[in-house]
Amino acid sequence: MAYEAVIGIEIHVQLNAITKMFCDCPNRPGDDPNTNICPICLWLPGAVPQFSLEILEKATLACLSLNCEIQPRSAFDQKVYYYPDLPKGFQLSQHHMPLARGGWIEIMDEKGDPKKLRLHHVHMEEDVAKLVHETEGRTPISLVDFNRAGTPLIEIVTEPDMRSSHDAMEFLKVLRTQLRYTGCAECSLEQGTMRCDANISIRPEGSSRLNTKVEVKNMNSIQHVGNAIDYEIKRQTESLMKNDPIVLHTRLWDPEKHITTAMRAKFEGPCIPDPAVSHILIADAWLQEMATKLPEMPNQKVKRFIQQYNLMYDEAVQMSLEREVSEYFEAVVGLGASPRTAANWIVAQLLPAIKEHGYAFSGSPVTPRRLAGVITMLEKNEINSGSAKSVLARLFETDQAPEEIVEQFGFRQVSDVKALTLLVDQVISENASAVENYKNGNQKSIGFMVGQAMKLSKGKANPKFLQEILREKLG
Amino acid sequence: MQEKLFVYEDSSASPASDGRFLNEMSLAVQPNMSVSGWPTEAGSKALTGFTAIYDATVVERLKAAGAAIKGSVYMSEFGFGLAGDSAGAALSQDQVDCVLMTDTMGEARVAACLSGAFGFKPSYGMVSRFGLIGLVPSMECYGILAKNLADISKVMSVVAGNDPRDLSMPNFGDDVEPPDFNPMAKTTESIGTIGVVTDCLDSLPEDESRAFEGMISKLENNGLQIQKVRLKDFDLAPTVHNVIGAVEASSSAGKYDGVRYGHRAPEAKNWNEMYLNSRGESFGLLVKTYLFQGAYFQYENYDAIVDAARVRTRLIAETEAALEQCDMLMLPAWRGSPDPSGAATIDSVYDVFAMTVIANITGHPAVTLPGMVKCKNTDLGLQLTGPRFKDSQLLSMAARLTKLARKGI
């Protein structure tokens, strides 16, 4: 019998708000331990929670970017359990009345066809503190860092619409792109600003039944999510073949051994309406204001880039993956570079160079104006593409304008026919055998001779012109 | 002083006389109301050694108005019930003019009756709860005990009103004047119509209900408008309070885990054991029972919570409907027969507060007047409830009623 996998995902995303959710402490969990704390997030007796409007705005924008329906009334619940990283004995989360319901995102399936994956809901919740386990002499001790306690999260819960690791990985990529576009979240699985649990079950192909699921945690990259799902599908299918029952439990992905191991029975504590944080009522006018703050989303941008700039589909996708790259691209085009050249230079030259120099994209010294300068000179045949690459490399080392670099280092392309003819004559006289080969029909020799002429010009000659003169002379 | 009334005394506190509003007034608080630098153990071993690091909003405002906060008095564990409480005694022994006392199910109002004083529970949301350490966030509030209503009004005019640190308060608006609590100014106005809650009379012993009805006829004979009103679900109030209160208490007390402050059991093999031992040693029998009840509803009987919340909504609607027919509701403060400080089970505690819990459930203001209804030398207290956020109006009508009574009805 053939089986198919049914996969749903729960994703925790850290919002990059300035403060924590219920107090004014900075939302910077990575600072020195226990420096960003106050009576509220430490839950000292007598503390009364506040609620941050900035966080509501960011959570709302995130939900709108995922096509969710914002609920006119939502409320916090207490998720009750006892653990030293939980200062209240409960976590404030939205269980009964989440901020948003529904929603969907579109991915490309294995065949390259569009597929809509539905979301069940999105809710807000606070993060817990961080436990650090050490030893004091021989005694194991646990330390608690409350910097993270009360920092803002949204949890996105999907419908079980995914059928393969491909679906899940594409889902996460698209989700990450869309959330990053809003500017509300960084979404890095590697850095823990996004955390993902996958719920996986198996059923006979064609069945509509939902079987007992297994929850898998601890995947620190999108690739890990894919690997863990593939492993779990294989493991569960084998269990079914052997008639071993699947029990509801939680498993951990082991990235070293590439296996999942059973952790514990899945625990669900009670969820009680919280009496301290007011219900959140959303007015239509406010929601409309939020909708106007939502930037153009990547899929809309792809369409527009194809129409407006005549980009190929792949180029448009590459220019839309990150919001800052898309804005950079449009800035370069706005400064006079032709769109396709700009797109190709950003992908093939700029992004690798930025990575090599260890910059974040936004911190790179190659501003849109400087790159546009390089591309414009290239397109006007003032420099050739080899020189353009050299100029780009120097942009990382000096703060000179590209035009100054071209002058200072003599990159200006020689397009003067007289000067080029002299070079060609020299190459013809020095490379008799190549000339002979060309005349015998070997087209490759012309490339060799152009190369020789370029060398003589110290890379400054216009190679197109060189070739034309050569062909004319050798007729 | 025969017995020790104060957990902590501030010997430097003396009433100021620099023209501020609360000059000449001395107050006591309970050790669950945060006063910066004071031991704040809330009557519980769970908070052993805990010192407040800031002033509660109420305390901050009292200090700013020039009041002398003389100390904190003994209290029941987290203000639940009256066992071990010395708020009333501090007042009757003339130690202070006013005591702030947590009112979770009617403690301040019943304690007032026991000591011949006036007791007031403000509307929920009228006074900031920032800095109040309690158990039942949606029902508890600062209560006030005083020898006269004028002092209660003076304190209210200082402590009531907007506080951005307490989200459970309605926004009274930036341009709203501090509530006007000056009951004596309007004593010539009509008292209005008084609604007698018949459902509560049915539950009184015969002699007590006779005493109460006697008082009502005296009022009628003096020309007051009296009308009978129904609160259909009145008898369910203690159960509703018990379910919601226990659930909220179980969550609220979750923070007493010995990790950050308070009592931590000295020896434990792991943190699970640390939790069990610390919490096991921290709470008294009554509170522990209450927390168990709450955990039971949370884990095993969520439907009971939903039912209680639904009846709570009905009780609010019934109270509001009754207050459309009259200006205030009248009922006894307590039944007189139960022993307030000896109540050792949850049921017997609720028995003491059978007449008062409803105001905590619905959030309405309520005030008790002493010396109006006596039965076999016990003061049953006269309790008045008014519309929510009309606290000053209620105190004003209560003052007029008191004046009338003193003229000899």
Image (cartoon, coloured by chain):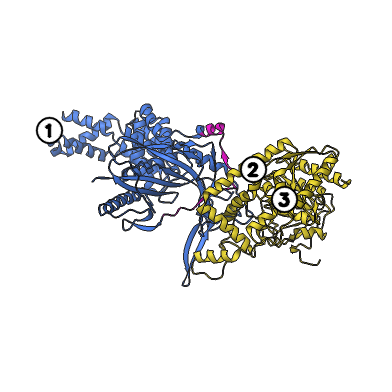
User: For the magenta stretch, what is the residue range?
Assistant: A266-290
Q: Distance between the residues labelled 1 and 3?
A: 124 Å
Image position, residue B264 (x, y; %) = 57, 66
Label 3 secondary element? loop
Camera-near label (1 vs 3) is 3
Q: Does the magenta stretch include residue B399?
A: no
Image position, residue A327 (x, y; %) = 43, 35
Dividing the picture into quadrants, the one containing residue A411 is: top left
Q: Distance between the residues labelled 2 and 1?
A: 105 Å
> With respect to residue B177, does B137 lie above or below?
below
Residue indicated by mark 1: A439
- How many discs appear? 3
Image position, residue A208 (x, y; %) = 32, 41
Which quarter of the image is occupied by the C terminus of chain A? top left
Name the residue type under label 2.
Leu
Say yes or no: labels 2 and 1 on the same chain.
no
- Which disc, if any, is residue A221? none
Residue indicated by mark 3: B204
The chain coloured yellow is B
Viewed as shown, does residue A20 lie left or right of A408? right
Residue B352 vs residue A264, the one in the foreground: B352
Residue contact at pointers 2 and 3, CB within 8 angstroms: no
The numbered mark 2 sits on a residue in which chain?
Answer: B
Q: Distance between the residues labelled 2 and 3?
A: 20 Å
The numbered mark 1 sits on a residue in which chain?
Answer: A
Residue contact at pointers 2 and 1, CB within 8 angstroms: no
Within 10 Å of the Cα at label 1, are there few (<14), some (14-19), or many (20+) other Cα atoms? some
Residue indicated by mark 2: B315
Within 10 Å of the Cα at label 3, are there few (<14), some (14-19), or many (20+) other Cα atoms? some
Label 1 secondary element? helix
The chain coloured blue is A
Camera-near label (2 vs 1) is 2
